[in-house]
Image (spheres, helix red, strand yellow):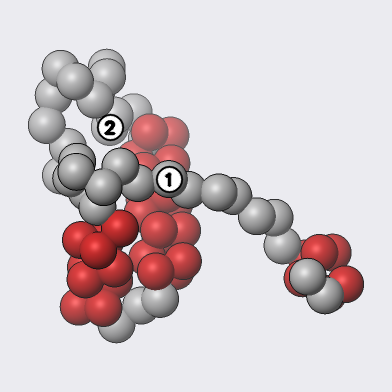
C-alpha cells in the first residue's frame, strides 16, 4: 500500500456469505447497473443508512422489519 493511500484512506474487510443474499455478485451487479464501482456503491449505501438512522428513520432491528 502506498504512503498516500495509507495516510488518506481506511480499509475495511467486508465479507459476504456465498449462499446468502446479498452475495458479492449481487452487489457488484447492482453497482454496475448504478454505474458505480463496488466500493463506491457500498460507501454510498452506508452513507444513506447513516443519514436515515440520524433522521430517526431506522427501524428497531433488521430481523423485525423489512428494509428498502
The answer to which image quadrant residue 38 occupies is: bottom left
Q: Please name the residue that numbered disc 1 is placed on.
A: 15
Residue count near mark 1 (Cα–Cα under 10 Å), binned few <14, some 14–19, many ≥20 = few
Residue 20 image position (x, y, % from top left)? 19, 41
Tag 2, which secondary structure? Answer: loop
Asked if the residue under mark 2 is in contact with the one under mark 1, i.e. CB atoms within 8 Å, the reply is no
Q: Quadrant of residue 29?
A: bottom left
Residue tagged by mark 2?
57
Specify the label residue 30 is tagged with: none
Q: In which quarter of the image is the C terminus?
A: top left
| Residue that appears at 82% across and 75% down | 2
Left or right, residue 55 beside residue 7? left
Whether residue 51 is visible here, answered yes or no, is: no
Label whose residue precedes the other's in the sequence (1 or 2): 1
Would residue 37 be visible to someone looking at this image?
yes
Is the residue marked by circle 2 packed among few (<14), some (14-19), or many (20+) residues within 10 Å? few
In three-dimensional space, the C-alpha distance between marks 1 and 2, rounded to whole angstroms, equals: 26 Å
Q: In this view, does 51 lie to the left or right of 58?
A: right
Question: In this picture, is 57 found above or below 17?
Answer: above
Residue 60, image x and y in percent?
27, 17
Amino acid at each position: 500500500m502506498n504512503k498516500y493511500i495509507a495516510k488518506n484512506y481506511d480499509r475495511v474487510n467486508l465479507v459476504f456469505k456465498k449462499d446468502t443474499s446479498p452475495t458479492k455478485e449481487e452487489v457488484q451487479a447492482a453497482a454496475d447497473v448504478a454505474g458505480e464501482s463496488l466500493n463506491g456503491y457500498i460507501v454510498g449505501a452506508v452513507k444513506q443508512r447513516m443519514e436515515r438512522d440520524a433522521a430517526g428513520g431506522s427501524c428497531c432491528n433488521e430481523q423485525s422489519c423489512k428494509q428498502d
